[in-house]
């Protein structure tokens, strides 16, 4: 039986007269990868920032692992991990130093090498953050979300700007995190990424959820309406060609 770990009921967020989030409701099940998709300005980032306790809501209810956002926001902070953007790190500290720094903030004891092993960065333990490639920075960013052993992690467009090998490597990392029992909430503008990774997705537009289901079921529902692509779908795409020709191995400095 599925267990709800995040419950959002009639969530609203207003900025003056502007309604950024217009009474949305959804549940996230424990152990799934849940995608929140939508165009820029749709309200998805605002929604996640409210759940992450980073932004105040106007009205509605949010429960995270049975904890009320209104009553115990600090307790929610203890059980979630939020992916930081690059600007959140001291560029001249080594990865090991950064892990010790974040562990101290969380009052956790962490073995840096074990954590770096989980994201394939052991060989960069003594490298400075500013020396990492784009893919390495993203993997390290995800590693820092795991320091406090969270029940839920939030990943905001984690593969933006990465080359195909780094992108697919990160997909495998995200799947491994989910397989370890951690619930993953992800935003992405890449629909192929959402289709590969997400157990379910909510599509939000103009502050409202307009669809919520598994990617397969949403696609089937569209096909059932008589929708057809304007040309035959090939059995591979250009990214498949690129990966096949250049290999799956990450090429990092």
Image (cartoon, grey):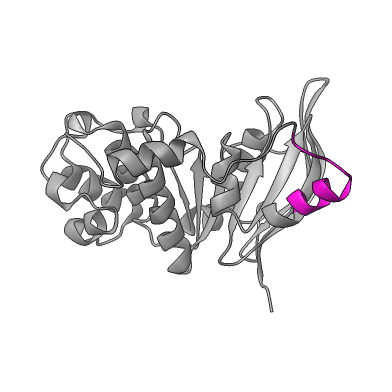
The location of residue 161, given as percent across then percent down, is 41, 28
99, 244: nearer the viewer: 244
Tell me the residue at 68%/38% (across/down). Answer: 232
Magenta region: which residues? 218-229
Residue 73 is covered by the magenta coloring: no
Kindly tell me whether residue 51 is visible in this rendering. yes
Q: Image check: 27 left or right of 86?
A: right
Is 54 situated left or right of 92 in this image? right
Residue at the image position 35 percent from the left and 30 percent from the top: 86
Q: Is residue 9 above or below residue 230?
A: below
Residue sitting at 76 percent across and 51 percent down? 218
Return the residue found at the far left: 126
Above or below 54: residue 177: below
* Percent position of residue 137, x then y: 30, 37
Whether residue 75 sits left or right of residue 204 in the image: it is left
Seen as rendered, the residue at the extreme bottom is: 1
Q: 134 or 182, which is in the foreground?
A: 134
Q: Quarter holding the N terminus? A: bottom right
Residue 221 is covered by the magenta coloring: yes
Residue occupying image coordinates x 78% and y 20%: 16
Would you place residue 152 above or below residue 194 in this image?
below
Nearest the viewer among 81 and 167 is 167
From the image, which quarter does the C terminus lie in?
A: top left
Q: 162 or 220: which is nearer to us?
A: 220
- Please state the horizontal and vertical placement of residue 181, each as a whole percent of the image: 48, 69
């Amino acid at each position: 039986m599925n267990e709800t770990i995040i419950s959002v009921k009639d969530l609203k967020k207003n900025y003056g007269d502007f309604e950024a989030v217009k009474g949305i409701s959804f549940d996230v099940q424990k152990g799934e990868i849940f995608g929140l998709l939508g165009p820029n300005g749709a309200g998805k980032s605002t929604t996640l920032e409210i759940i992450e306790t980073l932004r105040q809501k106007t009205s509605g209810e949010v429960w995270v692992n049975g904890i009320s956002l209104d009553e115990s926001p600090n307790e929610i902070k203890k059980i979630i991990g939020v992916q930081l953007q690059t600007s959140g790190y001291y560029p001249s500290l080594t990865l090991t130093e950064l892990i010790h720094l974040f562990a101290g903030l969380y009052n956790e004891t962490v073995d840096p090498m074990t954590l770096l092993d989980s994201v394939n960065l052991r060989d960069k333990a003594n490298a400075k953050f500013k020396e990492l490639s784009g893919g390495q920075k993203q993997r390290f960013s995800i590693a820092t979300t795991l320091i406090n052993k969270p029940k839920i992690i939030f990943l905001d467009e984690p593969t933006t700007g990465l080359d195909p090998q780094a992108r697919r490597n990160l997909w495998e990392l995200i799947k491994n995190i989910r397989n370890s029992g951690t619930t993953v909430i992800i935003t992405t503008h890449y629909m192929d990424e959402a289709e590969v990774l997400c157990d379910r997705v909510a599509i939000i537009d103009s502050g409202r959820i307009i669809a919520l289901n598994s990617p397969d079921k949403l696609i089937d529902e569209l096909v059932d309406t008589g929708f057809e692509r304007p040309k035959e779908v090939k059995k591979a795409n250009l990214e498949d060609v690129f990966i096949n020709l250049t290999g799956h191995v990450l090429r990092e400095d």
